[in-house]
Image: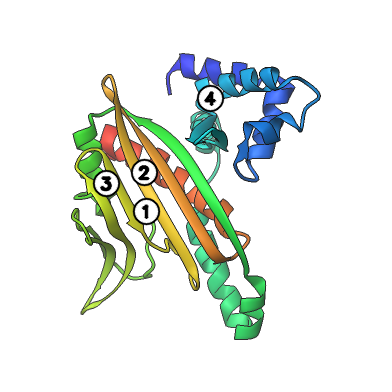
């Protein structure tokens, strides 16, 4: 993260209304109109605050027709954390690993009736962006051919290998050997160096429909990777937050450092 990017983030956070906007958005995306109703100022003033947050990379905007949906982008905040805080703490397991262990522990101590009762029909949508100092071709290669080198999460406690088949109906799967394994996603759409769309549970279980998309946009010598993850069905209330943090871990810490530094 460059110094000017850090300054932009602190400037964006210097106004209490913009901090409140992020507090609202951490609970899920909101339209500009919905956010305007939360403040005793004009819609124009709220839009100015949103423009500043977007310029600092703290929110991501997606437009659906005439509606503007605003999403929190946790990656810049994670970058600040990594720069000054994380080096002073012991390294924790990732959020998705914590979630996996929690679910398995609860399943061992609960009967099926109680497990089903905990789930409820709901949905979530996660939008994140990360800038990687590399051309699109290199990022696309890491997302597909080299995914085993940086994808941190595994469903097996034993050694396994992750494989991504970069073609229509191709699979993103975990190979446990001896014909055993698990599918993380199935390719629905793929355009080389531009976009990948997959359908996959990503650690969730049961009656869930989950889609995630990577879009690559070249900005000078960098590539902006845009993630969208939608899930609907019988969802555990903890899954959205776990996956939001999990994507930050994967894209900001793992993929970015792997492509830029080979780590």
> How far apart in space, not on screen, are marks 4 and 1 (Cα)?
29 Å
> How far apart in space, not on screen, are marks 4 and 2 (Cα)?
24 Å
Local packing at callout 3 (Cα closer than 10 Å; few below 14, some 14-19, many 20+) is: many
- Seen in the picture, residue 213 relative to 135 is either above or below; the reply is below
Give the farthest residue toward the right: 40
Residue under label 4, please give it.
Answer: 54
Q: Earlier in the sequence, mark 1 or mark 2?
A: 1
Looking at the picture, how far across and down is residue 37, in whole percent? 75, 32
Q: What residue is rendered at 61% in x and 59% in y?
A: 238
Mark 1 touches mark 2? (CB < 8 Å): yes
Mark 4 touches mark 2? (CB < 8 Å): no
In this rendering, does residue 93 appear at all?
no
Q: Earlier in the sequence, mark 3 or mark 4?
A: 4
Q: What residue is rendered at 24% in x and 44% in y?
A: 142
Q: Which mark is residue 254?
A: 2
- Observer-side mark, 3 or 1, equals 3
Colour scheme of the picture: rainbow
Q: Earlier in the sequence, mark 4 or mark 1?
A: 4
Q: Nearer the viewer, residue 231 or 76?
A: 231
Residue under label 3, please give it.
Answer: 143
Q: What residue is rendered at 69% in x and 36% in y?
A: 34
Residue 11, quarter of the rendered image? top right
> How far apart in space, not on screen, are marks 3 and 4 (Cα)?
26 Å
Residue under label 1, please give it.
Answer: 152
Q: Earlier in the sequence, mark 4 or mark 2?
A: 4
Local packing at callout 2 (Cα closer than 10 Å; few below 14, some 14-19, many 20+) is: some
| Quadrant of the snapshot with the N terminus | top left
- Observer-side mark, 3 or 4, equals 4
């Amino acid at each position: 993260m460059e110094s000017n990017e850090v300054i932009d983030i602190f400037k964006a956070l210097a106004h209490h209304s913009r901090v409140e906007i992020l507090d609202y958005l951490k609970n899920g995306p909101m339209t500009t109109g919905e956010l305007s109703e939360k403040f005793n100022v004009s819609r124009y003033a709220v839009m100015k605050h949103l423009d500043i947050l977007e310029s600092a990379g703290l929110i991501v905007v997606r437009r659906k027709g005439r509606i503007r949906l605003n999403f929190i982008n946790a990656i810049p905040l994670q970058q600040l954390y990594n720069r000054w805080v994380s080096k002073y703490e012991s390294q924790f397991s990732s959020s998705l690993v914590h979630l996996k262990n929690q679910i398995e522990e609860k399943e061992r101590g609960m009967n099926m009736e109680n497990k089903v009762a905990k789930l409820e029909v709901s949905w979530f949508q996660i939008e994140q962006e990360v800038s990687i100092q590399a051309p699109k071709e290199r990022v696309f290669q890491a997302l597909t051919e080299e995914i085993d080198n940086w994808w941190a999460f595994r469903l097996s406690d034993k050694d396994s290998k992750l494989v991504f088949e970069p073609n229509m109906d191709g699979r993103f799967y975990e190979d446990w050997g001896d014909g055993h394994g698990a599918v993380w996603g199935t390719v629905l759409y793929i355009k080389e160096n531009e976009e990948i769309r997959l359908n996959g549970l990503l650690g969730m279980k049961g009656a869930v429909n989950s889609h995630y998309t990577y879009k690559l946009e070249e900005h000078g010598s960098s590539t902006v990777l845009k993630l969208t993850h939608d899930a609907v069905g019988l969802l555990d209330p903890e899954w959205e937050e776990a996956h939001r943090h999990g994507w930050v871990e994967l894209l900001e810490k793992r993929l970015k450092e792997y492509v830029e530094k080979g780590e």
